[in-house]
Amino acid sequence: MELLKSKLGKVVFARLFEGEDVLETVTLAAEKSHVTAGFFLLIGTLKKANLGFYRQRKYETIKIDSPVEIVSCMGNISVKENRPFAHAHISVSNEKGEVMGGHVIPGCLIAASGELVLIEAADARLHRKFDEKTQLFLWSMRK
């Protein structure tokens, strides 16, 4: 295990609008707010969702092509290739209350609205570096 402690910095609130992609918009909010390390929470509704399940060095896609409620979405912000990078997981429910979840991948589009709270880790430096073993970009941490 590798640990990094940080003080909390600014807290940013943002409303996401119909048709906006979750990952693109969270990344843009981090860029506009100059947040390069932190975490976020998001609630709202989606027109459709693309979820990922990591299996043996790749993500399998779970497509949901109908409206869903965001039960919970949380993630973190770090730096990948010199710009903020949002990594998130999400749980969504359909009209019957059935819940599905997974890794947020592009194509999760906001329906009515999304409410984002972004919390900065003020003095942390989280960078993503490619890891050969997992074939993923994983954290490299320092203050």
Image (tube, grey):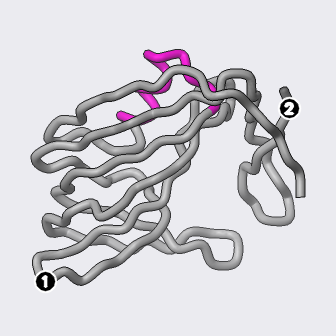
Left or right? Give the position of 40 relative to 135. Answer: left
Question: In this picture, is 115 found above or below 68?
Answer: above
Task: Determine which residue is flagged by label 2.
Answer: 142
Question: In this picture, is 136 found above or below 65?
Answer: above
Q: Residue type at mark 2?
A: Arg
Q: Residue type at mark 1?
A: Lys
Q: Identify the secondary structure beneath mark 1.
A: loop
Tell me the residue at 41%/43% (across/down).
Answer: 23
> At which x and y percent is residue 126?
74, 34
What number is the disc on residue 96? 1
> At which x and y percent is residue 61?
43, 71
- Give the overall secondary structure of the magenta segment: helix
Left or right? Give the position of 127 relative to 102. Answer: right
Circle 1 packing at 10 Å, graded few (<14), some (14-19), many (20+), is few
> At which x and y percent is residue 40?
47, 42
Indicate whether residue 27 is drawn in magenta. Answer: yes
Indicate whether residue 95 is drawn in magenta. Answer: no
Numbered range of the magenta stretch:
25-37
- Quadrant housing the C terminus: top right
Quadrant hosting residue 28: top left
Tell me the residue at 32%/53% (across/down).
Answer: 107
Whether residues under marks 2 and 1 lie with C-beta atoms below 8 angstroms apart, the answer is no
